[in-house]
Amino acid sequence: MINFLNLSQGDIFRDENTFREKIIGSRRISNYFWATVIFLAASGFFIVGLSSYLQFNLVFFLDAKEIVFFPQGIVMCFYGVAGILLSIYQWLVILWKVGEGFNEFDKNKGIMRLFRWGFPGKNREIDLVYSLEDVEAIRVEIKEGINPSRTIFIRIKGKPNIPLTQVGAPLPLSEIEKKASELASFLKVSIEGLVDK
């Protein structure tokens, strides 16, 4: 038995009857990096603002002697608190594994299951289950420009297109094409082409 929870991002487990891909969600290296950078920078702003109020440096390498508390110190404290709250939010999203899950296609059971973790609450688990008989096609959408995206969608009878790829930095075109063709081959459906928007 394969432990699907130990598959790394984008890992695909495939045999003749099962196709499963793990989605990493919010636990990307870039999210860890930005949550840490924002926390450190915001802490610096807050400490300098507080030092300007107290009239002495709380940390020896952050000099606040030239900063007047009103208005610069207040503004620095405000930005510091706002940044610390933003970084706490980012760390909570990482801790809660928001967006993490898997796409599973099981011919034995005749179902397609898309599972993602959401924010805590009554809708924490997002679990979509459809019959494989309702799958009509795989669709690949390419959008280039300032905010590029490369997304694989699955088309189901009577439902809007459902995205299968995770949000984040777009994968190379060759990798998107490979994943879409593997899935279409497994499901024995067509690929609705690359749409450039």
Image (cartoon, rainbow, N blue to C red):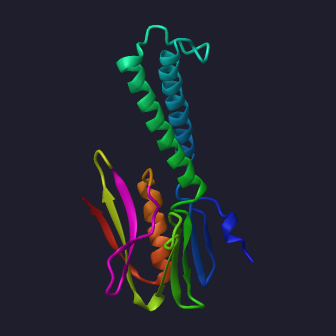
Position in image of residue 174 (x %, y %): 44, 57
Name the residue at 54% across, 30% down: 43
In this view of the protein, which residue sits in the foreground, 124 or 141?
Answer: 124
Q: Quick check: 63 above or below 23?
A: above
Placement of the C terminus among the 4 image quadrants = bottom left
In this view of the protein, which residue sits in the foreground, 84 or 38?
Answer: 84
- Which image quarter: residue 181? bottom left
Q: What are the residue bounds of the magenta stretch?
A: 148-167
Q: Quick check: 191 above or below 145?
A: below
User: Which residue is most to the top?
Assistant: 66
Name the residue at 57% across, 59% down: 97
Residue 166 painted magenta: yes
In this view of the protein, which residue sits in the foreground, 102 or 1?
Answer: 102
Whether residue 27 is visible, yes or no, is no
Residue 124 painted magenta: no
Name the residue at 53% across, 41% down: 35
Position in image of residue 10 (x %, y %): 56, 61
Q: Quick check: 83 above or below 161?
A: above
User: Which residue is most to the left?
Assistant: 197
In this view of the protein, which residue sits in the foreground, 2 or 25?
Answer: 25
Placement of the N terminus among the 4 image quadrants = bottom right
